[in-house]
Image: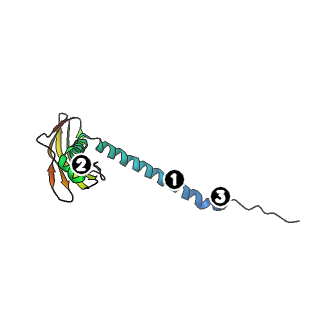
Amino acid sequence: MAEHTQQKSWFSRNWPWAVPLGGCLTLIIIFCVFLGSVIFGFSKAFTNSTPYQDGFIKAQEDEYVVQMLGEPIETNGIMNGSLLFENNEGSVDISIPIKGPEGEATIYVVGTKQNDIWTYSELYVIIDKTNEQVDLLWGEGQKNE
């Protein structure tokens, strides 16, 4: 009579290395998801800020910027700089990369917030292909939040 030996399953043969590896991979994936959500949350907070929105909207409304970049004008990467505000006071010094079908540029926003009012000392766009600086303040400079 022929003897049948039952072969162990893959997991039974490989559990000493599969369990630790699987646990480590799980922890790495959880950490990456957590880190990504934190970065996304900070990014969303910055893009929803008044100075960011003011700069982006003014660039989209400026006739010369639209002529140089084409429409639609969109963001082109991650904002750079600092944006600090607490209660009724704050400061901003950021650059926002933008692009259109015809070219790329960067919006620069510098200002302060006092009593819920943002006052911009600088708000301009630099067009990449011509290195021109386009002033977006138009003599305004203030925005209520």
Residue 129 pos. (x, y %): 21, 60
Can residue 94 be seen by looking at this rendering?
no
Q: Residue at x 48, y 53 (%)?
A: 29
| Amino acid residing under circle 3 | Phe
- The answer to which of 2 and 105 lies nearer the viewer is 105
- The answer to which of 49 and 53 lies nearer the viewer is 53
Q: To which residue does mark 2 refer? A: 82
Residue 118: name its quadrant: top left
Q: Label 1 crowding class (10 Å Cα cut-off): few <14, some 14-19, many 20+?
A: few
Q: Earlier in the sequence, mark 2 or mark 1?
A: 1
Q: To which residue does mark 3 refer? A: 11
- State the separation of the CA atoms marked 2 and 3: 52 Å
Q: Quadrant of the C terminus?
A: top left
Q: To which residue does mark 1 refer? A: 26
| Amino acid residing under circle 1 | Thr
Give the label on residue 109, or none: none
Q: Is residue 28 left or right of residue 68?
A: right
